[in-house]
Amino acid sequence: MLLQSAASAAFALALPAILLMYLLKRRYPETEIGSHLLWRRALREQEANRPWQRLRRSLLLLLQLIVAACLVFALMRPYIQGQAPSAAPVVIVVDRSASMTAAASRGSGEGSALGEALRNVAAAVEELPSSRPVTLIAAGAEPELLVQDATDRREIRRALEAIGPFYGRTDEEAALTLADALTRGKAGAELWLATDGRFRAEGAIPDASGFRLFTAGRNGANTSVAAFGLQSGADSHEAAVTLIHYGARPAEGTLALIPAGAEEPAAERPFRLESGEQRVFMIENLPAADHYRAEIRTADDYEADNAAFAFPAAAERGRALLVGERSLFLSAALGLAGFDIVQADPAGFEPGDETAASVDWIVLYGVDERALDTDAWRKLLDSRPVWRIWSASMPPRGGAVAEPEDNRADIRPHPVTAHITLADTHIARIVKADPGPGMEPIAVYGGVPVLYAGSADGRPRLVLAFDPADSDLPLRADFPILTAQAAEWLGGAALGHLGRAEAAGRIEIGVRSGTARAVWETLATIPVRPAGETATIEAERTSDGAVSAVQTAPGIPGLYRFVEYDADGRELGARLLAVHAAEAEGMWTDEPFSGIGFPGNGGEAGETADAASGGEIAAPGKTDAGSETRTDLAPYIAVLILLLLAAEWEVYRRGTAF
Amino acid sequence: MNAADRAGHAVPDGGRKRANGPLVRPGESLLKGVERLAVAASGRTRGTQQGKRRSGALGSSLEFADYRAYVPGDDIRRLDWNVYGRTGRAYIRQYWDEQETDVTFYLDVSRSMRFEPGASDANPETWSETNKLRYAARIAACAGYAALCGDDRAAAVRFASGVEGRLHPVRGRGAAHRLFEFLEQSLEPAADPGAEDLRIPLAAPGALPPRPGVSWLLTDGMYASGIEETLKAFAAARQHLVFVHVLAPDEWQPALRGELRLIDAETEAAKDVAIHSGALRAYDEALREHVGAIRRRCAELGFVYFAVDTSVPLEETVLVRMARHGLLQRQR
């Protein structure tokens, strides 16, 4: 028999209190008798040590003492450990959130709390009878059912060994809910939870018949690079780094800013942070670099937030080369879409290599392409996406001007036509011509195609088959939308970097047009991975094989480059993404286990937290429950107390003594 | 009042007069039974008047004692002429003398004798048949009546912590009412609660009878000390003592239970006692020891010890038990 709350033995002080009350009791019924003589002689022994003698054989007192002792015993919450049914399932929930990568408890010999927890769980699994099925759930963004109802110990061990940390936002509650669903209604089912206690799950822990907690990690200190920003000046950068310290004692260390490709820091700042202090460091005159790594060198227990990456905000806007007559509407719409216009007159302009390098894409507006039939123009037009706008006044070769039969518009799904209806738009003249190979009509007006999209040599091509001046389209709301979507499709929307994202978080990426394949290239990770692991990660694709615009950020904190390739394997562009671990994981403001509602009463959680606040959480043996089923003795004690009360009543009825 | 008692206490309901001794005076049927009895006395008594007791002296009874030679001056009516005829010598026939004996009743009227649970000490009217003092007084009345009927002299002394009153020896059946009256008065409330030591009332000078005789000591024996010495004093006063130990039924066998504060009726001292089977056993043992000590002492001194339970009907106690015990005998 074991006790869950041995401290309640202090209530045993009630027993001497009852004794004392009996001793102090003075109210005896007065009875007159003829003479004391014989009683004096009879009770000479009682006279000798009077107060104690009175207690002798006072059954009422005896019963009360037994009742009080039973109550104290019940308060100590005794239980009998019985063998669980041999086929009762065991569901193991492993918390693998980023905080589990923090240091293991002292003396455990493991590098991280996760390793410690997994080792303890593995040891406990070995002790299970082989007939008990084991289900293994890893907590992540969504609970991951690694092994279900497995009895093969090797399989379980392999699955345990394969569990790595998850740096994204971890939903422990979902994992526990799943575990609850798996244990519910199964006799003797047990729930094991391996965690460092750094999550909030109020009342979430299901009340399985057996609950066993594998604590790991220590109640240590963490200094976090909470934010890191880089502002680019004329020829130098300015950095702002925010540090936060969580821990009982002040932290001291050095903040280093390391430019891309360098080993030595470009700037260093010593720091001393009080408990809970948050401070911003401004560092100016940093040499220009693609990106910077801000790193703190201090003794803390959680490494994943000790470094952060930043890159200068992309200041430049996209540039489009507008060849042809000047159009106020088009210039304004492109300017709204975030593009600078470079106006070129085909008659007096011969593009060079600088031109090709300085513009992202080209608009040909009402230009007779025969005038552009030079090598320089051909080269430029082949190397850049082109948007042709035909004009009825100057139709392309073989083109004919047609008038739409009616004003019904037929819009086909395409990124360029996403929010376009052409409703109520009047188009006077439309040029009918061959748009070239690979071009598909994506909008038809009055039976005549008005918009073609396609690609040539891997470059997107777009054709608008009417002059906006021949319609009232520029007056419609569709026009700036059409222009912006066309510009985005042609020029690739985000020319700047991808910014920051949480590990394994979902991010939206404007994929460049013509991208056939994209990969994540790992530039650096926190903590630093062995070289072999810094592989590239293939980007996600949609169901039709295109690179998806919504990507999952890489799972390990660090700096990544999103590289896009066209169908021929040519690199279209690369953008940087700084991935950080879920921020909540590093906020060590509360003590471990303080935010978790354990089954039964809350006192248990408090006790555990108390143990943790001492600095160490004992490693393997420190589990809150046995591996077998517990039979709580409290109901039996209650029955015993009732029987005793009945006996006491009987004694009272018959008289206090016998 | 139970049926047996009513039989032994056949007093009309209207006649509850103190003068008639309704509480003490035995019923007529009991008196009739007692009439034929006499108080036993051990050995030969020496009284001052003619009585029915065989005296230690030679006298004028019909009981032959001895012969002795005639000396001049002897009553020639006592000369045994047959012996003279055969032998020619004159012998005088001698007879035992018959004298009366003094029977003194010592009635303990201390508060422990008066005490009766649920009744008032001060009001004997509320007492039941089992009241010790009343019972003792009635025994004394019966035995005293028997003594008076047997031509003995009866005296009575009531005592608490001192001699409270005394009835000087009376003689003859006609004096019975004086005895009854005295006993009746003994029941009246007294301020004196009684003493812890029996010597205090009875070893006082003049407390014991000056002449040899029979003494009945009617008490509950609730004296912490002095019983033994008092018995010796009676022996020294050449008294043949009958120790009538009167105890109420709940003294023989207490019906108390639980944790009680016992109040002594005499001293009014309080005592907290948890009464359980063990305590009752201890009481029984103490009682047995107390009774045994008195009985032993009485036996050593040639006295009679007679224990009385007041729950036993008086008739049975007097007519059956006392007679069986030899305290009251048939008259010759």
Image (cartoon, grey):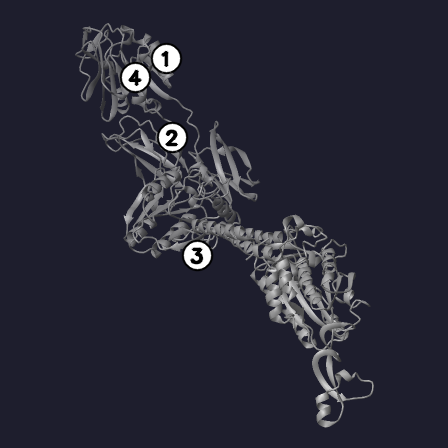
Mark positioned earlier in the residue sequence (2 or 3): 3
The label number, if any, that marks residue A332 in the structure image: 1
Mark positioned earlier in the residue sequence (2 or 4): 4
Q: Name the residue under label 2.
A: A498
Residue A234 horizontal/vertical position (percent): 48, 27
Asked whether the beta carbons under mark 2 and mark 4 sit within 8 Å of each other, the answer is: no
Q: Mark 4 points at which residue?
A: A419
Q: Which of A118 and A567 is in front in this view?
A: A118
Q: Is mark 4 on a helix, strand or loop?
A: loop
From the viewer's perspective, tell me whether residue B126 is left or right of residue A336. Answer: right
- Disc 3 sits on a residue from what chain? A
Q: Can residue B140 be seen in this view?
A: yes
Asked whether the beta carbons under mark 2 and mark 3 sit within 8 Å of each other, the answer is: no
Q: Nearer the viewer, mark 2 or mark 3?
A: 3
Quadrant location of the N terminus of chain A?
A: bottom left
From the viewer's perspective, tell me whether residue B24 is left or right of residue A423. Answer: right
Residue A194 horizontal/vertical position (percent): 40, 47
Q: What element carries label 3?
A: loop
- Residue found 19% across the figure and 22% down from its top: A438
Give the Cα distance between marks 2 and 4. 25 Å
Q: What residue type is labelled 4?
A: His
The label number, if any, that marks residue A1 in the structure image: 3
Q: Which of A268 and B257 is in front in this view?
A: B257
Q: Which amino acid does label 1 sit on?
A: Ala
Q: Which of marks 3 and 4 is in front?
A: 3
Q: Which amino acid does label 3 sit on?
A: Met
Asked whether the beta carbons under mark 3 and mark 4 sit within 8 Å of each other, the answer is: no
Q: Which of A325 and A460 is in front in this view?
A: A460
Same chain shared by disc 2 and disc 3? yes
